[in-house]
Each structure stands twice: as C-alpha cells, then as structure tokens.
Image (cartoon, rainbow, N blue to C red):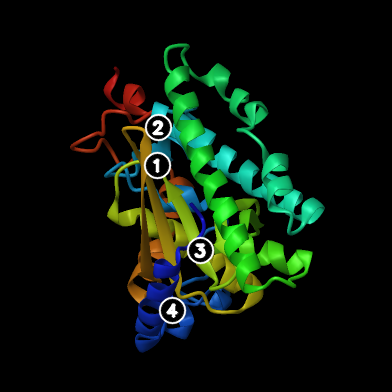
Amino acid sequence: MYFFTQEEHEKLVRFHLPRAREHPVADDLRGWSWAHPPLEPIYDLRLGVSEVASLYCQTRRDCYLRRVQNVQAPPNLPMIYGSVFHALLCDFVIRSKRALYVHGARIDAVLADVGPISAEVLNRFRSTLLPEQWPDVAQKAEILHQYEFRSLGARLQEALSHQPRVGIDALVSLVLPVVVEQKLDGTRLGLSPHLSCDAVHLGESVLIDLKFGPKRDFHILGPTGYALVLESLYEYPINIGCVVYVNFGGDGLRIEKEFKPLTDEVRSAFIEERDQKMRMIYEEIDPGLADLCYEICPFRPECRGR
C-alpha cells in the first residue's frame, strides 16, 4: 500500500513534483515559520492532526462533544476496520524489515520468516467486534496480507536484479523505503506532541495517508498537517501528499493513490480549521447540530437522541 509502482514513481517525478515547483509555497505557510502568523497557534491547546483534518461533521460538533463535553463515543465499524488494517500493515512492514536484516538477499528465507498473517495483531481487535463481523474482517485481513506478501517478493527480486551487490541496510531502504507510524512532536503548531503519521516515503519525502472507504475532498488535510509538522521540526520542504484509497471488491483489492501538491490553499485550509476548532474548544462554543448527520457518526445518539 505504501510503495509506488514504476508508473506511479514516473508520474510523481515527471509530473507532480515539477508541477508543485511551478507554484512555490509562500514562506509564511511553511512549517518552519511556526513562530509567526498565520502558523503561530492562537490558543494554548494541543490538537491531533486527525481532529483538525476530520470534516465529516458539517458543524464540527463531534470535536466540541469530545473535547468540551468529554463525551466518549464508541468507534463505529469503519473506524474499527481501519484500525485493524492499519495495525496489520504496520506490523507487516516491521516484520519484513526484520527478516531482511536477518536473511539479506535470500528471498525464500525472507518470505518464510515473514510468514502468514500475524494472528497476534489481528486478535487484539477481536473483542471490539461482534462474532458475526469477525469472518469478514479476517477474510479482508488475509487479502491485505497476501497482497503485501506478493509485493514484498516482487520488490525484493527487482531490487536484487538491479543491484546484486547491495548491502543489507541499503537493500532494506530499496525494498521498504518507508517509515511507518512515524512519531512527531507537533507542539510548535499547536498540535499534539505525540502525533503518528501513517507513513513517510523516504525516497521522495512524500507524506502518505491510508484510507479504507470512499473518497473525501478533505482527506488531503491529513498529509498537509503532517507535512507542516515535519517542516517545523527539520526545516526541509515537503511538497506532495498522497492519499491511498483501499477498497475490497470480490476476492481482491482496488487501490488508488491520489498525489496532490501541498499548496498555499490547502495549507491555509488546515490552519484555518485548526484555529476554528481551537476557538470552539477554548471558548466552549457549541456549534449546534448539522443539517445532515452521516448515519454512522459515533456521536449521533448524543446529538439526535438515537
């Protein structure tokens, strides 16, 4: 999920990155300008990137209920599914890196060490699901694992065919050029000191966010927030975000990667959303009910009484 095909890599290098350079980002919207407006936080609060980037509720009342009223809503089914699949993919990348460091270029040994799906990780979530929901989760998890397993073998074989004398550390970076669940301190931007980004692609400095479900225009706000944090910490520019949409159909997967430039417009949208939610929390402003609630909103019983 986190790795680019040759075609995607070519499009990134030959189209998306040059296009981003044609419209340079204003310096005051780079993360390293965190001590000055508009990036300087207006309130002494700490928000998660996901809190800022989530616009499922039209009025943002979900944020008000959670942060001001301390309402603890149980996760809905898509949230649980997403947690399971994220954990499995993260575990797969880590186990694959470990196997590569142990076995190096011995492809069969690497794949044997990675082995089948991690039942331990999968079972951590079993208690959060109804018994009748478990077979569906287990089946989809196996589909994900098999896809990643086959991709690992192909990527390893391709890397060794191009660089047969590669060292182990370099081989790992060629085959698995990502850091999963990258921990970041977002306090300079009024964000949580314990942020966790889905994945950072090391080759092109692309922020990757994984979504299991339908597309939403605001999904790019997640990679935007993490890009601002990375810029604030390390002072190097990040110009592209990637949202990976994974959907299950039949016995297979449908995967679509959306590369988007992190423009002035999308950066400003993230900061404006941060400021709006900070003000709502700090001043305890109830934004009221949305005209249209989405059916699976975990806060729906609190708002609608059912």
- Mark 4 and mark 3: Cα distance apart in space: 15 Å
- Circles 4 and 2 in contact, beta carbons < 8 Å: no
Q: At label 1, which amino acid type do we have? A: Phe
| Residue drawn at (43%, 18%) of the image | 133
Residue displayed at 41% across by 40% down: 64
| Residue of label 4 | 13
Q: In which quarter of the image is residue 79?
A: top left
Considering the numbered disc 1 on the image, is that residue within a helix, a strand or a loop?
Answer: loop
Q: Is disc 1 in contact with disc 4, using a CB cutoff of under 8 Å?
A: no
Q: Which of marks 1 and 2 is in front?
A: 1
Residue at position x 57%, y 66% in the image: 229
Quarter of the figure that contains the C terminus = top left
- Residues at marks 4 and 3 touching, judged by CB atoms closer than 8 Å: no
The residues tagged by marks 2 and 3 sit, at their Cα atoms, a distance apart of 23 Å
Q: Name the residue under label 2.
A: 78
Residue drawn 52% across and 70% down? 40
How many other residues sit within 10 Å of disc 1, few (<14), some (14-19) or many (≥20)? some
Query: Element type at marker 3?
Result: strand
Asked which secondary structure carries label 2, the reply is helix
Q: Mark 1 points at which residue?
A: 212
